[in-house]
Image (cartoon, rainbow, N blue to C red):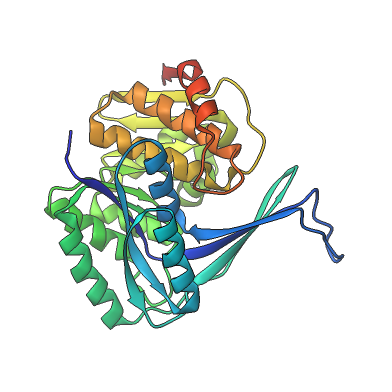
Amino acid sequence: MLGGMILTVTLNAALDVTYRLEAVARHEMNRVEAVASRAGGKGINVARVLRLLGEDAAVTGLCGGPTGEVIRRDLEAAALTDHLHPIAAESRRTLALVERSGATLLNEPGPEVTPGEWEAFLERYRGLLGLSSAVVLSGSLPRGLPGDAYAVLAAIAGDGGRPVVLDADGEALRAGLRGRPRMVKPNADELARLFGETSSTDPVAGLRGLCAAGAETAVVSLGERGLVALAREGAWTARPPRVMRGNATGAGDAAVAALTLGLVRGLPWPERLAQAVAVSAAAVLAPVAGEADMRVYRELLPLVRVEQA
């Protein structure tokens, strides 16, 4: 077991706005039933779920402008430790349209980060590693950052003896693997974008590709079908006992939180995966990303089916 807080990195922090409505009517006026606004971005969502699971978490990354100030005030209100690094450009907003049938996301591209701001953040990041038990690198990269930003951050953490969990997409994921993260967790679509559609029918083959490219272990989330994991100890599938209907936008972040917590606490893989599936399913029932229905989590946890693949 490692000591210290889990540090989550959100380089493209956002103000998440969630609209709930019966159904979206395209090219017509839509009446929103409820609206929620809060600090977001994948790493911030991970930190929120870690707190629900009883683990200390701190947030770092980049934010700026009036939207960045709103993000920081919300983190303070949520009692999340804020180590975000200020930049000059305006942080982005994301919009989730949550209907009864599912959710539609509209994500702004994010700010332009200067080379000087990136170097200043790296210096701050190095200082935070000494207080950390593990690092979570997740989400998109804002404009201006090098394409290998996650590889750089993972390598710095690895040199300091801190395990890294990487959750990214596309080239950010591909390049990040060169930093040799301890664990990588794409979803099925992200895995298919790297290795083609065959990974949809044979996810273990895709996970082998991730490990060959630099990850020590790999987990893919398959939505309502649960998780598949590949580690030195073996391969497993983990499935929820029933399908949850709701807002799945934060389910992957919830799984990352549980998997990282299992890593830090040295839990056996079947236990890690059961927790990740249960909290991911419970997150689907929460109204906004970064939350989970913990009553449902406790109900589902002993019912998750974990089998060797």
Rendered location of residue 176, percent (x, y) = 32, 56
Q: Between 214 and 111, which is closer to the camera in this rendering?
A: 111
- Going 48% across and 58% down the picture, which residue do you hit? 40
Q: Is residue 184 shown left or right of residue 154?
A: right
The single residue placed furthest to the right in the displayed view is 28
Can residue 149 be spotted in the picture? yes
Q: Nearer the viewer, residue 62 or 81?
A: 81
Vertical order, 233 against 44 (above or below): above
Residue drawn at 36 percent across, 78 percent down: 87
Q: Residue at x 50, y 28 (%)?
A: 297
In the image, is residue 14 above or below residue 48?
Answer: below
Instruction: Report x, y in % for residue 306.
Output: 43, 19
Q: Is residue 126 shown left or right of residue 237?
A: left
Image location of residue 309, percent across then percent down: 41, 21
Tell me residue 132's x, y (percent): 20, 50
Q: Where on the picture, by quarter, is residue 178?
A: bottom left
The answer to which of 38 and 223 lies nearer the viewer is: 38
Is residue 12 visible to us here? Answer: no
